[in-house]
Amino acid sequence: MARDASAQRIHNSHSPIPSAGELRAPEPEWVRRYNREPTGLTVPAAYPKAFVPQKSADPLDDAVNFLRQGKPEAAVALLVPMAGPGTESHGVWHSLGEAYGMLDRHADAEAAFRSAIRLRPDAAESHHNLALSVAYQNRLDESIAHFLRSRQIQPDNPALEQTLLTILLTVLQSRAEMRDHPLRVLDPLKAEPLVSVIMPTKDRPRLLETAVKSVLAQSYRHWEIVIVNDGGADATEALRASVLAAGDRIRYLNSAHSIGQAAARNAALDAARGDVLAFLDDDDIFLPHHLAMLVGGLRTSNAGFAYAASELVKEEVSNATRMELERTPMFPGHRYSRNILLVRNFIPINSWAVRRECIDQAGGFDEDLRCLEDWELLLRLSAHFSFHQMTEVTSEVRYRGATRDSVSGRNDLAPVCAQIYRRFAARGDAQLELARALYIDTLKTPPQAT
């Protein structure tokens, strides 16, 4: 019994944080390999292990120490002789499962964890690792039941819930899309359509100036910009040079008071003259080939909606100078899937290009939503029109870590997310409902600056 207890302390996800003198074992290869799968939906390590070298006369304790040191071969050599038909030690079987998993021997890991669970059906960590070993054999649907059993035994396990959400999103992405009717077929888009770039702004004139200049630098030249000042200070002085360069291709609409981001975008849509609509927030940037890439994608695919990849850039702004601090891809590796879109948004608005007739049929942004109105519009559009994805990065989403100057940074997202879920019902789809419940739990933390 004492040997089982010592083994379980290693695999407990709530073990203490190591002190400065302790070393953390490397991430197991079986986790690293799964993280390289092309879906871009990564599974985090379930149970971090602290490396605390010890000496013991107990072979199980020695095997556990080998696991802490990242030496699964040595652990297997000690554990296999102890594991047999008559072995009644949960710790032996669980540790053997861990060792096999670290060696990419997932079928053997599965068998070991099943033996551990036979001895201790209430061991949440064994169910969790059984779920992982099944998942790494690409039996994702089957793994979900084991994740749920572990969650039932140990409800408060954020690491498990994040892993389970990842598995569910991967499964949903691979499934056929749920549709009530076929997608609408559009007439071919003409060769050089006018692109209207919609830009809401409020009290960020210097950032707005940079955003506008990124449109002026586009290799695709048939565009216009429609700026709506949402009740902020007048920004025309900051735009003087850009207006001189672009002439009447830049139009500036002013609202005397703040009407909200959705209403500001709708006002710009009403004024737009383009056959294609693109969107750019006042603190973000188009790369020079952005519009050319999107127009080309719309024309070759004959889709109603096209989008490219974006990068998330953390920056500091001081005395009108922008300094980049960090750059990461947004939603790397995600393939377009309306099933995932029914759970969460993964298409930043700055990456969009949508044909005007699609907006006219689906309607504009919902002005009753205080945030997430872009996601809600995507759900309406994707119900009727095909989406075309391009993987090249063509835009940058910028944010300041010390400020809350975005709508998502100022609002509690969870209640609005629940409201959108009610509009687009899961219709009894158990996997979709579970993914939604897990995702909304991730939003119930204090909002972060974006």
Image (tube, rainbow, N blue to C red):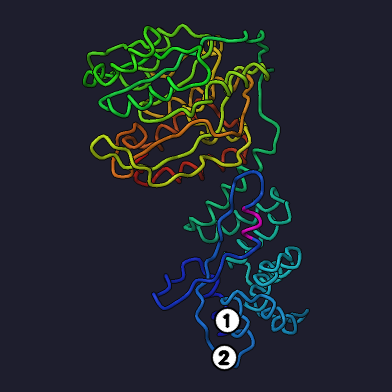
Disc 1, disc 2: CB below 8 Å? yes
Q: Residue at x 68, y 70 (%)?
A: 97
Does residue 164 lie above or below 320 as drawn? below
The secondary structure type at the circle numbered 2 is loop
Q: Nearer the viewer, residue 325 or 405?
A: 325
Quadrant where the N terminus is found in the figure: bottom right
- Using the image, tell me which numbered label, if any, was put on residue 234: none
Q: Total label count? A: 2
Amino acid found under the numbered disc labelled 2: Ser
- Using the image, tell me which numbered label, if any, was put on residue 56: 2
Q: Residue at x 42, y 70 (%)?
A: 17
Q: Residue at x 63, y 36 (%)?
A: 335
* 32 in magenta: yes
Outermost residue, bottom side: 57
Majority secondary structure of the magenta segment?
helix
Q: Residue at x 28, y 16 (%)?
A: 240
Q: Which residues are magenta?
A: 31-35
Horizontal side of 202 relative to 63 (left or right) equals left
Residue 248's x, y, as percent? 37, 7
The residue carrying mark 1 is 65
Circle 1 crowding by C-alpha within 10 Å: few under 14, some 14–19, many from 20: many
Residue 274's x, y, as percent? 49, 9
Q: Earlier in the sequence, mark 1 or mark 2?
A: 2
Amino acid found under the numbered disc labelled 1: Asn
Outermost residue, right side: 85
The secondary structure type at the circle numbered 1 is helix
Quadrant where the C terminus is found in the figure: top left
